[in-house]
Image (spheres, rainbow, N blue to C red):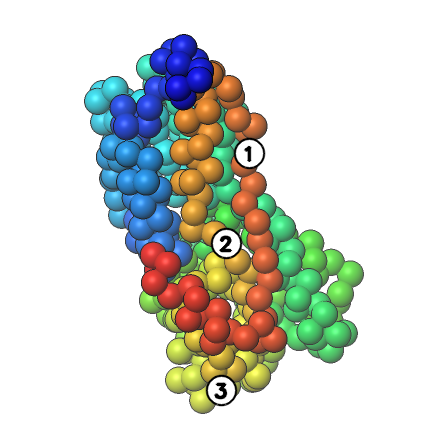
Amino acid sequence: CATVLAGCVFSSVSAADMTVGFSQIGSESGWRAAETTVTKQEAEKRGIDLKFADAQQKQENQIKALRSFIAQGVDAIFVAPVVATGWDEVLGEAKDAEIPVILLDRTVDADKSLYMTAVTSDLVHEGNVAGKWLVDTTAGKPCNVVELQGTTGSSPAIDRKKGFEEALKGHDNLKIVRSQTGDFTRTKGKEVMESFLKAENGGKNICALYAHNDDMAVGAIQAIKEAGLKPGTDILVVSIDAVPDIFQAMAAGEANATVELTPNMAGPAFDALAAFKKDGKEPPKWIQTESKLYTQADEPQKVYEAKKGLGY
Ligand code: GZL
């Protein structure tokens, strides 16, 4: 800064002066817990004062938190919106208060002028990658699929279903015979998989499980084993997130594939915010994070060792 003192003096609202309110959904999955840990680490790195609010997966708690952040006059709001609808009013209040809002890992059905940017993966693409893996793996063989959907009305549940179904189009050997929400949790994933197994001849009619996240898949794997079947062989298992525990299951031959979702949505969000605060530069409306397929061929035990402890 020594050489461009003027620029520094006028342009750098140093991060240390910034307060950001973060409305987090809850801790429904290992991935969600990692996102919280990483967001706090990213704030710490930048000297940002992060006000954290856990909504216990209830939208009304998120709306209350946003109103509280607005009343406190925070410099910006981050929100991971539990469901896609019902945000217009409170986002309008943030806009009126001239507080920029950044969406993390999920999107909302609201006018794009109501938020600065959304930092998310391509959720449709994730479902598509999972579906394509199953198409390739079954190679035309008849295969009844059961699906554990994410939280009803959330953008990942809607988009991951859409992408998966698109991949299966034209491959009539693959049929989704049961599809129900497991709310992104292990407990519910196990419960719903138990009902699928009972309804499908003890699981003998089921060839594959597609779970919208690894936590539901891990719960379902337990149910499959308790039904006396081998997950990963009797019933193929494909899911999304790439949390450490799914790699442990893969290493044991009990899961087959996962699509990686980075828990670090906050890094790009903080960077976009800093650029905006520095010189008013608006980011694009979507900052997309990468998605990568992992299978049993990718040395899952090694990946598990590398990932565990990264906030999960
Ligand atoms: C997806 C994210 C999902 C994760 C789940 O972007 O919103 O929420 O896939 C989490 O693990 O519950």
Q: Which mark is residue 261?
A: 2
How far separated are the C-alphas under marks 2 and 1? 16 Å
Looking at the image, residue 6 lies above or below residue 32:
above
Q: Would residue 198 be found to the left or right of residue 130 on screen?
A: left
Choose between 79 and 147: the one closer to the eye.
79
Lower position in the chain sequence, tag 3 or tag 2: 3
N-terminal label among 2 and 1: 2
Q: Point out the tag, 3 or 1, that comes first from the N-terminus.
A: 3
Can you identify the residue that label 3 sits on? 229
**Amino acid type, residue under disc 3 in the picture:** Leu
- Quick one: label 2, few (<14), some, or many (20+) residues within 10 Å? many
> Could you tell me the amino acid type at mark 2?
Leu
Q: Give the Cα separation between the discs numbered 3 and 2.
A: 29 Å
Q: Secondary structure at mark 1?
A: strand
Number of other residues with Cα within 10 Å of mark 3, as a class: few under 14, some 14 to 19, many 20 or more: some
From the top left corner, tell me how far across and down residue 183 is, in percent. 40, 56
Q: Quadrant of the N terminus?
A: top left
Q: Give SS at disc 3.
A: loop
Disc 1 target residue: 286
Question: Looking at the picture, how far across and down is residue 189, in whole percent?
Answer: 41, 66
Q: Amino acid at mark 1?
A: Trp
**Residue in the picture at 58% in, 72% down:** 298
Estimate the spatial distance between the alpha carbons at disc 3 and disc 1, rounded to whole Å: 42 Å
- Pick whichever, 184 or 297, lies toward us: 297
Q: Residue at x 54, y 36 (%)?
A: 287
- Answer yes or no: disc 2 within 8 Å of ligand 1: yes
Callouts 2 and 1 close, C-beta under 8 Å: no
> Can residue 62 be seen from the camera position used here?
no
